[in-house]
Image (spheres, grey):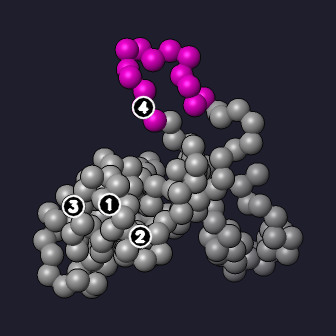
Amino acid sequence: MTVTEAPAAQDDWRERLRQAGLRVTQPRLAVLDAVRDNSHLAADQVSDRVRAKIGTVSTQAVYDALNTLTEHQILRRIEPAGSSMLFEINAGDNHHHIVCRSCGAIVDVPCAVGSMPCAVPQQTYGFVVDEAEVTYWGLCPDCVARSVSSAAAVDPQFEGAASGRDLHQ
């Protein structure tokens, strides 16, 4: 699968929508711009950014645009456990995500080298599998630093404060 860059200009979005057989509408263009500029947004965050860009637009119009753009594989929907649906541009690059357990920050990470872990199930139990998703979980650098600072504030003898070692080994 080839990598598709997110268009930088609305003319490029227009072309991409037409290639997908979709009408070009202001809500769709605004949704695409919002998600391109701020990846991993929830639907309400996309809606806020769309309203800031084009003014009055119904929440339903934004949700319809998100669903249509996802169905046509222009956007990708991800659903980390414990989080609402998030949207990103579907770059076609088969990347994964790493999610901070503390603050919820999400970062794209390249596909793991070698064989994918459990990408193809040994048994489908009658399911028609259409997607496999890998999500890594941990603490982001800011949350690790806060954990070290908090532990040092409570106990100045805390060894992690001086060493900066990973607290979750």
Disc 2, SS? helix
Q: Is residue 85 visible?
A: no
| Cα distance between the residues tagged 4 and 3 | 27 Å
| Cα distance between the residues tagged 2 and 1 | 9 Å
Q: Is residue 121 left or right of residue 165?
A: left
Q: Amino acid at mark 4?
A: Asp
Q: For the residue carrying disc 1, how many other residues have a C-alpha within 10 Å: few (<14), some (14-19), or many (20+)? A: some
On the image, numbered disc 1 is attached to which residue? 17
On the image, numbered disc 4 is attached to which residue? 130
The quadrant of the rendering that contains the N terminus is top right
Q: Position of residue 88 (x, y in %)?
A: 44, 61
Q: Is residue 2 left or right of residue 124?
A: right
Tell me, for residue 23, which label it has, or none: 3
| Cα distance between the residues tagged 3 and 2 | 14 Å
Q: Nearer the viewer, residue 7 or 157?
A: 7
Q: Nearer the viewer, residue 110 or 17?
A: 17
Q: Is residue 128 left or right of residue 96?
A: left
Disc 3, SS? loop
Q: For the residue carrying disc 4, how many other residues have a C-alpha within 10 Å: few (<14), some (14-19), or many (20+)? A: few
Q: Position of residue 110 (x, y in %)?
A: 66, 53
Q: Position of residue 82 (x, y in %)?
A: 41, 52
Residue at image coords 53%, 57%: 4
Q: Range of the magenta residues?
A: 118-131
Q: For the residue carrying disc 3, how many other residues have a C-alpha within 10 Å: few (<14), some (14-19), or many (20+)? A: few
Farthest residue toward the right? 163
Q: Amino acid at mark 1?
A: Leu
